[in-house]
Image: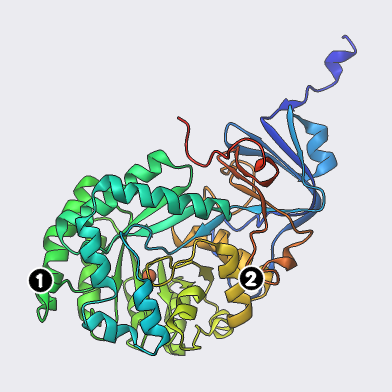
Amino acid sequence: MSKASRVKAKEKADLLIVNADELITLDGGSQKPRAGKQMQELGIIRDGGIAVKDGKIVAVGKSAEVRHNIRAENVVSADGKTILPGFVDAHTHLIFAGSREDEFQMRIEGAYYLEILNAGGGILKTVRETRKASIDRLADVGLERLDAMLEHGTTTVEAKSGYGLITRDELKILEVMKRLNQLHSVDVVPTFMGAHAVPPEFKGNTQGYVDLVTDEMLPKVAEKGLAEFCDVFCEKGVFNLEQSRRILIAGKSFGLKPKVHADELSMLGGAELAADVEAVSADHLLFSCDEGLRAMAKKNVIAVLLPAAAFSLMNNKFADARRIIDLGVPIALGSDFNPSCWIENMQLVIGFACNFMRLTPAEAITATTINAAHAINRAPEVGSLEIGKKADILILDVPNHKNLGYRFGANLVDKVIKNGRIVVDKEEKRGEPMVLRRVE
Ligand code: FE
């Protein structure tokens, strides 16, 4: 036997990242979202390394160990930096036309959300503009927004329809998401939310609109395979509990998993409804009572909290995250990106979550990675850095995770790796243009 044959050949990878001060794996969480004290467990490896091949993670561990087993031409040093999974944004309204900066000023001057909506503003203004916009136009704005999100570290994003409110335009928005999935490296997970508001055509006839959603929209969305989830704005003056329940049950019959905009502006019982219909998540939860939260815990419904949305409501009122954790409900975070809460930056969402809701940086990281992946049924693929998962990886220019939430407002991203490719690189910014979109 020759000497060389006794030495095991090193496996070859496409990319090797080594010497990270902290490598946050969040390993072992793919089966179940983390709740209670488990939300603090990040699975940190100091002096960590990670290797990537064919878009997947092939090794994770101490730098020396990974280097010992793997060779690669492209080796990146993360010395002084923190590696973590790409952010998963569990709740956005990504696709709409126009903007609402005028209304922002009205809100500063004291106008209330439902007042603006009842006066034909708010969602309804965006609906008018979105109906007029072409699929190409909406895809263009979608690409710009995904670029901004990716630059700030978001690699997977949930996106809801709900600015069409007639069958043709709800389908159009979902078609845009399908196109974005082909054009952009960020993964878009589509949710049908025809029940976002009652359109002007059905003013005073909410029941008639609910019928349209269940009897016409849902069958078409399902037939075309355009959505995975069905969401409803369960709120006083919008869709009541019974109407919301009907829509979610109908969605389930078409294979769409339920999500609920619950107890955002008042305590209506949206949390209980989410538990009743076995929703994947209940979102917002500013006014939920213990009873509703306990029901959620029992049925494994994830609380998707949206502190940026609460911030933009200007009421100094946030979901009671500490109570939600104490009651055993797993928390995920989302941006709630929408025309009245224009935020593409999950690092800032973490900043809000820590500063206003008193999540610790570790809890907020869990909530924006593995738990957010659970909230959109992507936990087997993303949300943690484990062998076999998608190589969606962030390198942040901070020496440890405790800087997240503490340092907010500036972009801490050094590099974003999506499907194993470096798509954002601060070091290259001065040279070649960054490639955010798919080249295939
Ligand atoms: Fe929302």
How is the model colour-coded?
rainbow
* Residue sitting at the far right: 3
Element carrying mark 2: helix
Q: In which quarter of the image is ligand 1?
A: bottom left
Using the rendered view, name the quadrant where residue 265 is placed.
Answer: bottom left
* As drawn, 108 above or below 361: below
Where residue 305 appears, x then y in whole percent? 49, 74
Using the rendered view, name the quadrant where residue 9 is placed.
Answer: top right
Q: Which badge, 2 or 1, is on the more N-terminal residue?
A: 1
Where residue 210 appears, x then y in whole percent? 15, 71
Q: Residues within 10 Å of mark 2 (few under 14, many from 20)?
A: many
Task: Choose between 430 and 171: the one closer to the eye.
Answer: 430
Instruction: Name the amino acid type tagged 2.
Output: Glu
Q: In this view, does 421 lie to the left or right of 204?
A: right
Task: Choose between 364 and 124: the one closer to the eye.
Answer: 124
Screen quadrant of the N terminus? top right
Where residue 221 appears, x then y in whole percent? 22, 53
Using the rendered view, name the quadrant where residue 195 is placed.
Answer: bottom left
Q: Residues within 10 Å of mark 1 (few under 14, many from 20)?
A: few
Q: In this view, does 368 lie to the left or right of 240?
A: right
List the residue tagged with mark 1.
201
Q: In this view, does 264 lie to the left or right of 52?
A: left
Residue at point 24%, 75% (across, down):
244
* As drawn, 91 above or below 294: above
Q: Is mark 2 within 8 Å of ligand 1?
A: no
Where residue 251 appears, x then y in whole percent? 24, 62
Disc nearest the viewer among 2 and 1 = 1
Residue at point 22%, 57% (across, down):
170
* As drawn, 415 above or below 433: below
List the residue tagged with mark 2.
363
